Amino acid sequence: MTAPATNIPHTEHARFFRSPALPDTELLTARYVTHSFAPHWHEGYVVGVITAGAEGYRYRGADHVAGAGWLACINPDEIHTGERAVDEGWAYRVFYPSAGALLGIARELRGGAMSGLPRLPHTSVRDVELARALAHAHALLEEGADLLAAQSAAYQALAMLLVRHAGEPASPASRASLVGLRPDMAD
């Protein structure tokens, strides 16, 4: 039995961009129906807001699903995949903040004290208020009309992510051990 159809279109599109309001963050707005991502990694974080449908992905040896209104969070240098979890695919808005960008926000939140990179221990996060804030900030960054408003909204949303969902910082040793798992380092 297939999942019920939704009002999202069945065409695929992706727009990858940057905003001068958030120079250390790449951004993506996309809609995928048949596209899937082979195992890959990013040097920075992945914070995706699922806006329609559902995305399935393999991460840390387990299968995960994030539906509309959920966040999909991936830490730097960690291998993951991506594919549709329902027939109509998924749409999302994704932030790819550099490790330094999120570390900078975390240091500001902690008054400068931070011994390692922030860690997002939960990959599928249900937080309606945060998802709404991130999607709103992402839309402002994409529009590009008011850079100060976009920057402020993005900072507040990413700070909310850290306050609500970040665990203890990753130690330098544990982060370095991940390098051995990177596909570009394989024999």
Image (cartoon, helix red, strand yellow):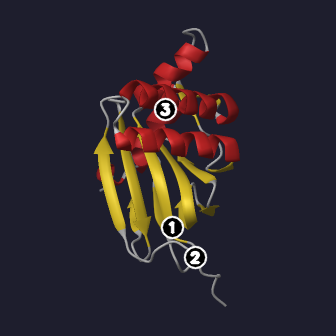
Residue under pointer 2 = 86
Looking at the image, which residue sits at the far front?
145
User: Which image quadrant is residue 162 in?
Assistant: top right
Residue kind at label 1, given as amino acid type: Trp
Residue under pointer 1 = 90
Residue under pointer 3 = 154
Nearer-N-terminus badge (3/1): 1
- Local SS, label 2: loop
Q: Quadrant of the N terminus?
A: bottom right
Q: Where is residue 172 shown, x and y percent of the image?
A: 49, 26
Q: Is 151 situated above or below 134? A: above
Q: Can you see residue 15?
A: yes
Q: Where is residue 101 shown, x and y percent of the image?
A: 42, 27
Residue kind at label 3, given as amino acid type: Ala
- Local SS, label 3: helix
Separation of marks 3 and 2 at Cα, in angstroms: 29 Å
Neighbor class of circle 3 (other Cα within 10 Å; few <14, some 14-19, many 20+) is many
Q: Is 52 situated above or below 97? A: below
Q: Quadrant of the C terminus?
A: bottom left
Left/right placement of residue 168 relative to residue 92 reads right
- Asked if the residue under mark 2 is in contact with the one under mark 3, i.e. CB atoms within 8 Å, the reply is no
Question: What residue appears at the point 39 percent right and 66 percent down from the top-left corner?
Answer: 38
User: Which image quadrant is residue 158 in?
Assistant: top right
Separation of marks 2 and 1 at Cα, in angstroms: 8 Å
Residue kind at label 2, given as amino acid type: Val
